[in-house]
Image (tube, rainbow, N blue to C red):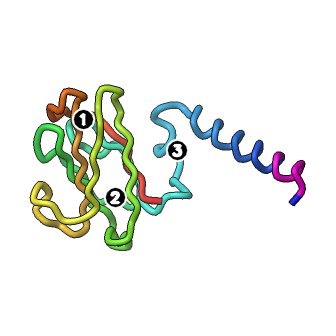
């Protein structure tokens, strides 16, 4: 591949990524079927599911602890699960598999949220399984 062709592809990819980043906050999943994700969710700080794809339910299990149940066609055993906090004050941890927090369910992702001082923190978040 020539350097010019490589540069052109790289710029096109960067432009597409920049466009995706500039979507309005609520429009990413509400107006899209998340074509590049097998499952995706926007979860509010109180645990309610705002919108999603291949998500059965979500709930808040406790302060800073959330359970997100995925559809039956999603196998969490070999899934890569990504989560992004809705607040710059939060750090997220994700467990793709059974936890005591979510009643040992094999179809549920557990999301934990902490503040920078290590205290559990309620926050909204976005979850994706590519």
Q: Which residue is mark 1?
A: 45
**Which mark sits nearer the N-terminus, 2 or 1?**
1
Residue density around tag 3, few if under 14, some if 14–19, many if 20 or more, within 10 Å:
few
> Mark 3 touching mark 2, by CB under 8 A?
no
- Determine the CA span between mark 3 and mark 1: 21 Å
Residue stretch rendered in magenta on the structure = 2-7
Q: Which residue is mark 2?
A: 55
Q: Position of residue 10 (x, y in %)?
A: 75, 47
Q: Position of residue 25 (x, y in %)?
A: 47, 32
Q: Main secondary structure of the magenta part?
A: helix
Instruction: Please tell me whether residue 49 is drawn above or below residue 35 in the rendered image.
Output: above
Residue extending farthest to the front is 3
Foreground: 46 or 11?
11
**Which mark sits nearer the N-terminus, 3 or 2?**
3
**Which mark sits nearer the N-terminus, 3 or 1?**
3
Q: Which residue is mark 3?
A: 31
Mark 3 or mark 2: which is in front?
2
């Amino acid at each position: 591949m020539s350097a010019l062709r490589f540069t052109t592809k790289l710029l096109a990819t960067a432009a597409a990524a920049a466009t995706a980043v500039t979507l309005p906050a609520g429009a990413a999943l509400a107006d899209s079927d998340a074509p590049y994700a097998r499952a995706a969710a926007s979860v509010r700080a109180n645990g309610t599911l705002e919108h999603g794809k291949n998500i059965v339910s979500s709930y808040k299990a406790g302060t800073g602890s959330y359970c997100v149940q995925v559809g039956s066609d999603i196998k969490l055993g070999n899934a890569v699960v990504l989560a992004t906090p809705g607040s710059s004050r939060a750090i997220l941890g994700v467990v793709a598999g059974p936890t005591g927090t979510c009643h040992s369910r094999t179809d549920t992702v557990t999301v934990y949220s902490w503040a920078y001082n290590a205290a559990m923190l309620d926050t909204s978040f976005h979850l994706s399984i590519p």
